[in-house]
Image (tube, rainbow, N blue to C red):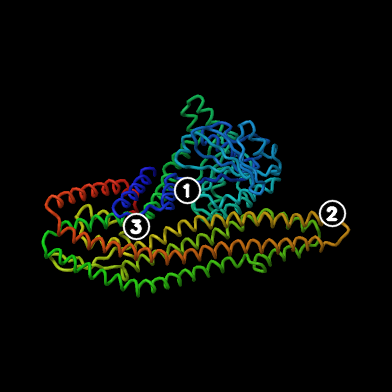
Amino acid sequence: MEQVTKSILAAAQFNNKLTGEPISEDFTKQIKRFGAGIFRLVVMGEIKKGKSSFINAFLGVKDLVPVASDVATSTVFKIHYGQEAGYRVFFEKSTGKAPVRIEAAELADYGTENGNPGNRKQVDFIEVISTAPLLKTGLVIIDTPGLGGLFKEHKKITWNYVPKADAVFFVTDSVESPIGLEELEHLNTVRKITQHLYFVQTKASAVDAEACEARRQNNLSILSRAFNTPADKIPYFVVDSLRKFSADEDENFKRLERSGYPALMTYINNNLLSQQHRILAGKAISLATPILTSISSNISARKETLSADTAEEQQRARAAISKAEQELLNWQTEKLPELSRSINREFADLKAECERDCAMLRPNGELHASLEDAINSCENKEQLAGVVETLYEKMPEAASARMTEIRNKLETGVADIMKSLWNETNTQLALRIGAHSQNGSTDLTLSANNHYAPVIQVLTDGGDLYKGLRNGAIGGSIGMSIGSFVGGAVGSIIPGLGTAIGASIGGLIGSFWGGYEAGKELEEQELRQAKQLALNGLSKNISSIYSDITNALRDLFRRFSDSVDDAMRQSLRQRTAELKKVKDDLVERSRMSAAELSKAKNELAKDEATLRTIMKTLEPWMPANH
């Protein structure tokens, strides 16, 4: 990824040199973010399953995060690479506290139930900086509190992070009961959020080999039935942290193999990380496509201009440019307004669909009504307590799953619109400049499945002026400009929704619980008073949740519509400038001396070599159908 991002940034600088086009600060930031290769691996599961011990052994660092049979993690640990190991505590924003550096001996004071019961210290998360080599790849491991047991607050914390995961490792063990119904409920929600779900069975040495294998087979059978998936298609690993650390100390290869970690590491390196890097590289290259196209267009046009040695050839070139200018005018007056209306209609339909999905969460909607029914049906305070407790456990994951479904629909819908735009602009509406040659005129159009071919072709067959103009057509530039916006907007706004939902759900549960606790203190009053407290809290917080969602989506839709218009206007300006430059270059070419022509051709050869070097790095990471 480092080489990919370096090449893309080099391409941006190269394009700036050739065309004078400035390098966008947002573009640079996004490319560098892709280059960091950040891959968020969330580790979750019931309490006391050995999650923290698994992470320590996975990274090969003893006591990196707190582990003890009587210690439960109370907050989130975010583990990433750094040249110097250390820890920082980040507090909830509402506290206004700045992050605090702590020593390893102080971890339990902030990150466990023993030292920070109920998270009284209002810790948001603990940053763990480790020198573990595996983290150099950009892997970020998020260790979440356990889901079960007495610590109900842990579920809300965990489900604030699961929607942001690139992959989830669900940890169970070889000692306690097999995967149960409650765990399956969690897993079904996780599967709606990410397709990258993997299973780790810990504590293999705590039972004999036969019992360990029986547990593995039993769990796989349960998962296979629940997911309707063959057992051998479910990524499932059996590990033992004690064996791993013992093997590391003694450099005992056989014991290391028995620990199960080599098989897990091989899978991660060959599947998870390599796949993630390819996805990130593909996104970065897509973002850079307009720049690569602009470079190849510039080189192709210059090559054709410098090759126009006769007056007849130069006259043909001027005629082709005049035709292109007329088509550009038609674009400006007719095609672009039509295309803009079409795109915005499609996006309005997508907006309406997403809003319909949000309707479940609106005041007096499906969710609100069902929760009111659950509260009103309680016959005593004990039943009300049960309803409150169930909501406390289930609401965060239910809200996360619903918002993730909406986010996925939005991303898929935008991608479809972009694909439609690309096809439309490159088959019907794009500038089609006939390639006049010795053999006559040819209509050339960039195929939707051939985005990168023009860049490579200009290095192999020499290209021509008209291919260069075609490669820089309005359509591709608009599509990629809007696509770039969407990538940033969806990435910035939708995760914000997750945060808003988590905060609102927390307030909702707090209102329920507060209502019940207040009801208990008023023992002489009717049950309806406790119910009313819960219903009031429900109405207030449902409204808050729905408002957060609709406001964020409305802002996203508005920004998308604005970006369509901005991209089209920018593309018109750019293409007009390109045509003018080609005309000016032709005039200059006709006046060149032999020495000047030779110098210009040498500079062109150097620029071709530069592009060739950039493309050599990027080609292996391009989609298979390029």
Q: CA distance from mark 1 to mark 3?
A: 43 Å
Quarter containing the N terminus: top left
Residue at 36% across, 65% down: 422
Whether residue 593 sits left or right of residue 517 in the image: it is left
User: Compared with residue 413, is residue 65 higher up or lower down, i.e. above or below?
Assistant: above
Residue 148: x, y in percent? 66, 47
For mark 1, what is the residue?
232
Q: Would residue 71 appear left or right of 604 to someone viewing this image?
A: right
The reply to whether dot 1 and dot 3 touch (C-beta < 8 Å) is: no
Please give the name of the residue rendered at 23% of the width and 61% of the height, measured from the top-left corner: 582
* Residue 290 numbered tag: 3
Kind of residue indicated by mark 2? Glu
Q: Residues within 10 Å of mark 2 (few under 14, many from 20)?
A: few
Q: Nearer the viewer, residue 562 or 19?
A: 19
Front position among marks 1 and 3: 3
Q: Position of residue 183 (x, y in %)?
A: 61, 50
**Front position among marks 3 and 2:** 3
SS at badge 3: helix
Residue 204 figure quarter: top right
Residue furthest top in the image: 250
Among the two numbered marks 1 and 2 on one chain, the one whose residue lies closer to the N terminus: 1
Residue ID at (57%, 40%): 127
Q: Residue under circle 2?
A: 521
Circle 1: residue type: Asp
Q: Quadrant of residue 332?
A: bottom left
